[in-house]
Image (cartoon, grey):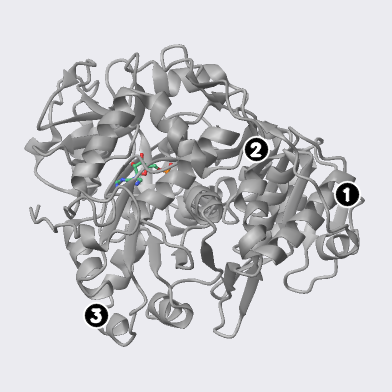
Amino acid sequence: MLEKTYLADANKRASGPYNFADYLKQYQFSIEKPAEFWAEQAQALAWYKPWDTVLSGDLVQANVRWFEGALLNVCFNCVDRHLVNSANETAIIWQGNEFEQVKYFTYAQLHEQICRLANVLLSKGISKGDRVCIYLPMIPEAIISMLACARIGAVHTVVFAGFSAESLQSRIQDTQCKLVITADEAVRGNKSVPLKLNVDLALKNCSSVTTVLVIAKMGAEINGQHEWEVDYRAAIADADINCPCVVMAAEDPLFILYTSGSTGKPKGVLHTTAGYLLYTTVTFKQVFDYRLNEIYWCTADVGWITGHSYMVYGPLANRATILIYEGIPTYPDVSRCWQIIDQHKVNIFYTAPTLIRMLMRSGNEPVQQTKRSSLRLLGTVGEPINPEVWEWYYQVVGAEHCPVIDTWWQTETGGFMLTAFAEVTSLKPGYAGLPFFGVKPALVDNAGKLLMGENSGNLVMAQSWPGQMRTVYGDHQRYIDTYLTQFPGYYYTGDGALRDAQGFFCITGRVDDVINTAGHRIGTAEIESALVSNSQMAEAAVVGYNHPLKGQGICAFVIPKQGVIVDEALKETLLKEVVQHIGAIAKPDIIYFVNNLPKTRSGKIMRRILRKIVEGGAIKDLGDLSTLAEPDIIKELLALR
Ligand code: WT7
């Protein structure tokens, strides 16, 4: 790895922490006196009533609560409070696939749209605590829907528009949603996704849903084909423009977002009101050093946590102007992102390494034909960024004057955990950096022994932070088992990391059976169960492997049943199976048909061996094979390469 460091220029910093010494001082304070630190930070929000206790409960008892006793509303903080001075400032710039498709929403207009929708939700019997499912493409209504829920205390669960009807169904069933907000279709480049049709399919087994609001995006007529169907736009037009914010308690649920783990179905990660909002607000401001009137573009989809924390909640609570783009980054060509930056004078660009790697492959010319002079800061998230890619992002895209801020965090953490701070901490390509305030990372070995100094191991957190998830919706035991029991007293991230002599962290990737492919998180177990749901399959094992563009590719080893004919058509069938059960993002890049899988004597699949088989390398690199039940399997596997 290149061990280069770029120094911060504290003269360029606009708000605190003002320099590295300041960071260190505040960090120490935040760790030693978290309650005092977060009480000070809480000034960033508007509260109807202050808290009685900043922090109660702990990681061991899995009952952490922040700002107990306080009352507030998230929508009020993200929109209403800005109306006093900034009603006519732009809140959202929406850019469609075509250049001329642009829409602006001022904070006042956003407020009106939210109030109208909130009244529609109320009129459909939605009230505080009810779950609402949002299944939409990147259109302003997606954000309006989230905020309308927050306004009346409904708990939203956004489902990425790339997920299949089946995935949608299991999420609706798990949350017992009463209402779904969707659109007739989503368009991705020249592909169309039949969202409404997927909802119809999903609802065949979802008795909890009583209303579906449909946005006629592509002009389809919403004619009440089903009695629960309502035309979103018609309903909004008739609704009142006044709707009071519901007063919420600090620990009332704000949203549920599903994410994949090592085993079983995706988990409904639950985030609550005060801690989550405060954490996203403060991290956004301090890490990016956000300045009023800057144009901020996060390329994430609303269906992921980045689209919640750093497209909607954190930025809007800071009264930012956000840009959202509905199209694909390569339409009409690979220069599109940089053209959008010029067109809208974007100051902060926040994206994933997978996109940077893809654009880097097209060379410097498509970048250099644009100016990008508005850019001040570049951010990255979602997977480790290779130092070469980091350098390209810094040198070519940012023309060596924009810090590249690598932010490590997870759906479960709500916001940034390990990160660079713009112009405060020095930048080390490939390293996510230092802990945010109040975050106490640690490394432990597999036996749970704490590792000190320069070292590598399992990344854990030794202290709660306000943005921490509170539970797995409907299954608190699963929350405890997944995150809090592996290493008692710590929150377990599932990532491996190394720490250098200065305390900078470099994330080495997941250590569990979770694949991070093109910035999307998918559990191997989910893909395996989709594959074996095909009646011709006996067994399947899925592993991630190093992939030059996607970070990790997906490789499936499948055992067909006796007598099944193995051919290209069978591969196609299996791919379709995965698309139907999960979505196109989970499609294996490689499928190997085998007669056997490497298992231990107790029957556990040795994925480590499979990973090595796909990635190549010598037989000696396969590691310890003595626990293999049938050593002959190695020969068969090697013959695949
Ligand atoms: C996993 C979490 C956080 C929003 C997007 C992903 C990986 C995330 C980084 C980074 C190296 C990263 C980790 C983590 N990851 N950011 N900057 N460097 N790895 O959220 O879907 O919950 O996935 O993404 O493996 O555990 P997520």
Q: Residue 364 has which mark? A: 3
Q: CA distance from mark 2 to mark 1?
A: 19 Å
Q: Nearer the viewer, residue 359 or 153?
A: 153
Which residue lies most toward the bottom here? 369
Of labels 2 and 1, earlier in sequence is 2
Q: Is residue 33 left or right of residue 451?
A: right
Q: Secondary structure at mark 2?
A: helix
Location of mark 2 (residue): 170
The amino acid sitting under disc 1 is: Trp
Q: Is residue 567 above or below residue 500?
A: below
Q: CA distance from mark 1 to mark 3?
A: 52 Å
Q: Residue 228 has which mark? A: 1
**Viewer-side label of 2, 3:** 3
Q: Secondary structure at mark 3?
A: loop
* Residue at (76% x, 61% y) in the render: 112
The amino acid sitting under disc 3 is: Asn
